[in-house]
Image: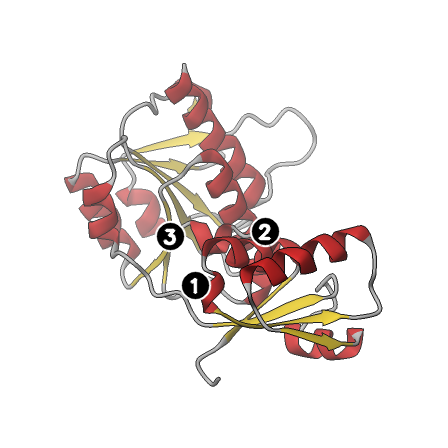
Amino acid sequence: MTSAKVLFGFHAVGVRLKTAPQSVIEVVFDASRRDARMRQFLDRAREAGVRLVEADAVRVAKLAGSHGHQGVAARVEPMVAAHSLDDLLDAVQDPPLLLVLDGVTDPHNLGACLRVADGAGAHAVIAPKDHAAGINATVAKVASGAAETVPYFMVTNLARTLGELKERNIWCIGTAGEAEKSIYQVEMKGPVALVLGAEGPGMRQLTRKTCDELVHIPMCGAVESLNVSVASGVCLYEARRQRLG
């Protein structure tokens, strides 16, 4: 049990039930919640053959470490990463589309970025081991299952990794408010890594210097910047739009 991790919320637990039910040790649920969504979830869990444990909201919150659990938490075996970044890139058949996050330490932001990356079809999300959030129960909850489906690589030296991506002919495009070109003026049909920094400080200087090109997201109102997950969505979906065109 010591190696087990915790997932909570309908989406996060539901995706694990769908993709790897054998890794679910047990599902703990709030027995006082009897609405249709809970009934449907429990039916799915029973079909997957997992152990169900009745509890109250306090116990579920204690296991989840959060009150945003929706009445559901699960103990699960950690998923073993199937590939290194190099192995993943070797296996990708389409032009790679990567999201690189520099200095994103808020687990809610990371979870939202993973959700966007999954929706836009990004092949992986990359972040430095320092100055970055890791995958935890909060990230998994906010990601709505994407923490289970999107490879997340934490690298020792982000600038070196960007250099290795460039050696693979992956164009590294960083976002910066002062950049001359906008995200809508760059070609992203080929291999691309979109590099975004944390809200406020943005990318670190070395990361910025390592990028092949800098672009900005047009801002037409009073605010000066977007939340990093929203900015990730704008950039990734523009790349997806170009690839579908």
Residue 217 spot, x, y in % from top left = 51, 29
Q: Marks 2 and 3, how far apart in space? A: 15 Å
**Pick the front one: 17 or 240:** 17
Disc 2 residue type (three-letter): Ser
Camera-side mark, 1 or 2: 2
The residue beneath circle 3 is: 151
- Say whether disc 1 or disc 2 marks the residue closer to the N-terminus: 1
Q: Hey, what amino acid is under mark 1?
A: His
Q: Tell me: residue 84, above or below residue 207.
A: below
- The amino acid pointed to by label 3 is Pro
State the residue lying farthest toward the left.
Answer: 167
The residue at the point 18 percent across, 44 percent down is: 90
Indicate the position of residue 96 as horizontal and vertical percent values: 29, 36
In the rendered image, the residue lying farthest to the top is 245
User: Residue tagged by mark 1?
Assistant: 131
- Report the disc number at residue 144: 2
For marks 3 and 1 on the same chain, the one whose residue lies earlier in the sequence = 1
